[in-house]
Image: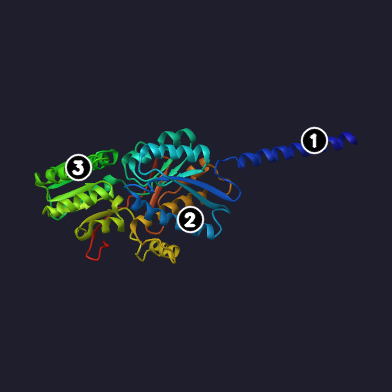
């Protein structure tokens, strides 16, 4: 009788040990507790892209706050640690190392820029940690496929092609490009060459400038020596604004277009009287539209200081995509399960943008449209 009780006791202890072991495994994923999910972000809070980053963060943080206020994701609240990389790739790498190795975040969220995102690839692969919604449209983020990178916005090359197509349609065949001399600019240049070839055009100018020490006067001189009637400018907001103002001050009347990385009110304001008529491509729907997504944006940001801007909408949409992936992962949250959950989102309409992921496709959205800055200093569709 005593031996039978002892066997039952041993069996009970064994079951408890197994249960404890399983529970430990379930709770072992970095950044996940019973009540929280910890995310990390390295982004240029200060530096040349700070204006766009501020608006983007406002949209994302508003959505996370809304989710947390309504019970979180499967019972867990989202926490986000943000480190400033000043738009410096080396600092971005160091920040990501700290977030992964010291802070033990579950995933990385929305870096900003091509060089500051691309440099993270080795860390993502080594630690098998997802990066959701890097704010760059560089092809290198899409091809070849990176298992732990999930893009949301469309490619820069799609934006450039849209501009060349528009210029060609309205009879502006002499199109030139002014681009920053880094991976961002090279990517856009590749798209420009492909688009020019597609529409059977010859580039009117291909002008590059240094990332750290841009010579605006030399750029203006090169444009003057060309026959460009339309220009695509690829660069961060401050130098892009300086080039536009210098061109206009010198009497240049070419139709000018720049990419979505400059789709901020701050960029418009920096142009002063030269803002009117400048074209800007957009990779998000307008935040003030009466679409499901636009209405949700208004509801979530009501009573806050979040600007009604395209950059804020990008942050908002990116946060929404990440949360959707977390929801689909269920309560037993793991990084591998999160990756597979995102990959299951095929042709997923989130209220105005169609997102598609799969095992061989982490591109997300292909949405691109052109806007022009009107006399009220607003983006007009």
Q: Is residue 298 left or right of residue 327?
A: left
> Can you identify the residue that label 1 sits on?
10
Residue 95 to residue 245: above or below: above
Q: CA distance from mark 2 to mark 3?
A: 41 Å
Label annotation for residue 188: none
Q: Quadrant of residue 136?
A: top left
Task: Judge the density around disc 3: few (<14), some (14-19), many (≥20) Cα neighbours within 10 Å.
Answer: some
Q: Is residue 379 left or right of residue 201?
A: right
Q: Residue at x 62, y 39 (%)?
A: 25
Q: Quadrant of the C terminus?
A: bottom left
Label annotation for residue 215: 3
Q: Indicate which disc, 2 or 3, sits on the residue closer to the N terminus.
A: 2
Q: Secondary structure at mark 2?
A: helix
Q: Position of residue 79 (x, y in %)?
A: 52, 50
Q: Position of residue 139 (x, y in %)?
A: 31, 40
Which numbered disc, 1 or 3, marks the residue closer to the eye? Answer: 3
Q: Position of residue 359 (x, y in %)?
A: 43, 40
Q: Quadrant of residue 119?
A: top left
Q: Residue at x 37, y 61 (%)?
A: 307
Which numbered disc, 2 or 1, marks the residue closer to the eye? Answer: 2
The number of numbered badges drawn on the structure is 3
Q: State if disc 3 and disc 1 touch (CB < 8 Å).
A: no
Q: State if disc 1 and disc 2 touch (CB < 8 Å).
A: no
**Observer able to see residue 178:** yes
Q: CA distance from mark 1 to mark 3?
A: 78 Å
Q: Position of residue 77 (x, y in %)?
A: 55, 53
Task: Judge the density around disc 2: few (<14), some (14-19), many (≥20) Cα neighbours within 10 Å.
Answer: many
Q: Quadrant of residue 10?
A: top right
Q: Indicate which disc, 2 or 1, sits on the residue closer to the N terminus.
A: 1
Label annotation for residue 64: 2
């Amino acid at each position: 009788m005593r031996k039978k009780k002892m066997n039952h006791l041993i069996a009970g202890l064994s079951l408890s040990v197994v249960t404890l072991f399983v529970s430990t495994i379930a709770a072992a994923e970095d950044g996940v507790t019973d009540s929280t999910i910890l995310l990390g972000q390295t982004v240029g809070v200060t530096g040349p892209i700070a204006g766009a980053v501020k608006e983007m963060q406002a949209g994302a943080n508003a959505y996370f706050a809304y989710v947390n206020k309504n019970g979180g994701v499967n019972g867990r609240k989202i926490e986000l640690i943000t480190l400033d990389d000043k738009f410096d790739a080396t600092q971005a790498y160091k920040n990501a190392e700290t977030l992964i190795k010291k802070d033990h975040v579950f995933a990385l969220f929305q870096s900003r820029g091509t060089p500051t995102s691309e440099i993270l690839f080795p860390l993502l692969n080594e630690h098998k940690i997802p990066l959701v919604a890097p704010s760059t449209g560089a092809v290198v983020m899409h091809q070849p496929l990176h298992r732990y990178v999930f893009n949301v916005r469309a490619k820069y090359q799609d934006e450039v092609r849209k501009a060349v197509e528009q210029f060609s349609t309205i009879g502006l065949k002499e199109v030139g490009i002014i681009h920053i001399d880094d991976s961002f600019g090279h990517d856009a240049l590749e798209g420009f060459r492909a688009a020019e070839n597609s529409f059977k055009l010859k580039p009117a100018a291909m002008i590059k400038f240094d990332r750290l020490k841009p010579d605006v006067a030399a750029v203006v001189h090169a444009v003057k020596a060309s026959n460009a009637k339309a220009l695509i400018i690829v660069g961060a907001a401050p130098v892009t604004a300086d080039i536009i103002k210098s061109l206009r001050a010198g009497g240049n009347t070419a139709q000018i277009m720049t990419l979505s990385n400059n789709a901020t009110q701050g960029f418009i304001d920096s142009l002063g009287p030269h803002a009117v008529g400048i074209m800007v491509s957009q990779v998000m729907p307008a935040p003030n539209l009466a679409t499901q997504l636009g209405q949700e944006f208004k509801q979530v940001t009501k009573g806050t200081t979040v600007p009604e801007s395209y950059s804020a909408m990008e942050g908002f949409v990116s946060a929404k995509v990440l949360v959707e992936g977390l929801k689909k992962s269920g309560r037993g949250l793991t990084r591998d399960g999160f990756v597979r959950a995102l990959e299951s989102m095929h042709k997923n309409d989130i209220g105005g943008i169609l997102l598609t992921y799969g095992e061989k496709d982490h591109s997300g959205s292909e949405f691109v449209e052109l806007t022009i800055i009107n006399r009220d200093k607003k983006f007009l569709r």
